[in-house]
Image (tube, rainbow, N blue to C red):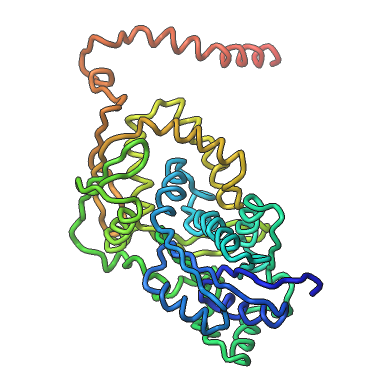
Amino acid sequence: MTEEVKKVVLAYSGGLDTSIIINWLKETYGCEVVAFIADVGQGDEVKPIKKKAIKSGAVKAVVKDLREEFARDFVFPMLRASAVYEGTYLLGTAIARPLIAKAHMEVVADTGADAVSHGATGKGNDQVRFELAYYAIDPHISVIAPWRIWDLKGRKDLLQYAKKHGIDVTASRKKPYSIDRNLFHISFEGGSIEDLEKEPPAATYVMSVPPEKAPNRATFIDIDFVAGDPVAIDGKKLTPGKLIEKLNDIGGRNAIGRADCVESRITGMKSRGIYETPGGTILHVGRRAIESIAMDREVMDLRDSLISRYAKLVYYGYWYAPEREALQKLVDEATRCVTGTVRLKLYKGNIIIISRKSDSSLYHPDFVTFEEDTVYDQRDAGGFIKINALRLKLKAMMEQKRR
């Protein structure tokens, strides 16, 4: 390696890849390694990860609690955009990456490091997401991506490397899953999951019960929204992070939020991912219910026409790009009116809308009633139809001429 590096900050997860990378960086560059651990809601695994990083050879391990910032400044703005990638994926992994990268760069500045490193593979999405964010924050930062330069070819090689160097890892050849968990979701990739003809092992799912084991009685919940963001469950106000945690618990018990996706990666190949997003799925359905009564038709149509573009920007790693920021302003303006309460019925994997109400509601029974009313003259519809049919009539006339 020709690049001189004295100190590297590694985005450390405690998994197979990053556990090996600490030792590999020290061997390859002769540098110090600072492990950065982003707490975005992994749960009880954060504390053991810090100890493991030091045991694996890091000179220092820095933990940042990012849970509330994650929910407030990343998940909620994305939910306001109604973003869903390729119709099924609620972007739980993708939306955490720009925040992790931002906090990563803060640790670089605090420690005076020369470079950053991550454990994302050369085939995956995260290398793109992390590095686009790094460069958006510091265009001159040096990035070390071991998977793109070392001679280890796959999980088998990594397990052998770990055994050779006495590195404690939790993955095995029988269960070499890639697992990503945060406050919003959990994902599984790799191993037997790659076989599209097989159902994922039951043990894959950890946040939700299968529908067969969900309660036989429905659960009813009320969610309050203000300007597109959820603020309370059953009348109790909660912080963004606590609200998502609460809905994850409620949704998981009712088998909500499972998704089996075959998605198009940034690099072009398709991959299968198993996702659990109980709280996010509930919020997505609930907010759309309030939008249906409070948002103007054409404004909603405009926002919805941009869902695919917004979702791609998140998935492809362009959170800090000017086009995402511009889209966010439109989204936020469009959802200012989305204030109200929705009641939902959760039952064995289903989310059923029971009621919705909003002071901003554009729904008026007096206008849509089939009974006699004083606000709508049905004879006006004839002229409306004729005007809208004019171009169709002209097209038909031209076709008749050509016959």
Place of residue 169 in the rendered image (x, y in percent of width and height, measured from the top left): 52, 84
Tell me the residue at 44%/31% (across/down): 334
Q: Is residue 365 left or right of residue 124?
A: left
Q: Give the percent coordinates (x, y) of residue 242.
A: 31, 56
Q: Residue furthest right?
A: 2
Tally of numbered discs: 0
Q: Residue furthest left?
A: 217
Q: Is residue 92 above or below residue 300?
A: below
Image quadrant for the N terminus?
bottom right
Residue 108 screen position, x and y as percent? 60, 63
Q: Residue at x 71, y 15 (%)?
A: 402
Image: 60 above or below 230:
below
Would you say residue 259 is visible in this rendering? yes
Corner quadrant of residue 399: top right
Give the side of residue 249 with respect to residue 1, left or right.
left
Residue 195 visible at all? no
In this rendered view, identify the residue nearer to me: 39 or 193: 39
What residue appears at the point 58 percent right and 66 percent down from the top-left corner?
A: 111
Residue drawn 39% across the image and 32% down it: 336
For the C terminus, which image quadrant?
top right
Quarter where residue 338 is shown = top left
Where is 243 relative to 160, above or below?
A: above
Q: Where does the image place residue 388, in percent across and percent down from the top left? A: 50, 14
Task: Identify which residue, 102 or 363, lies in the foreground.
Answer: 102
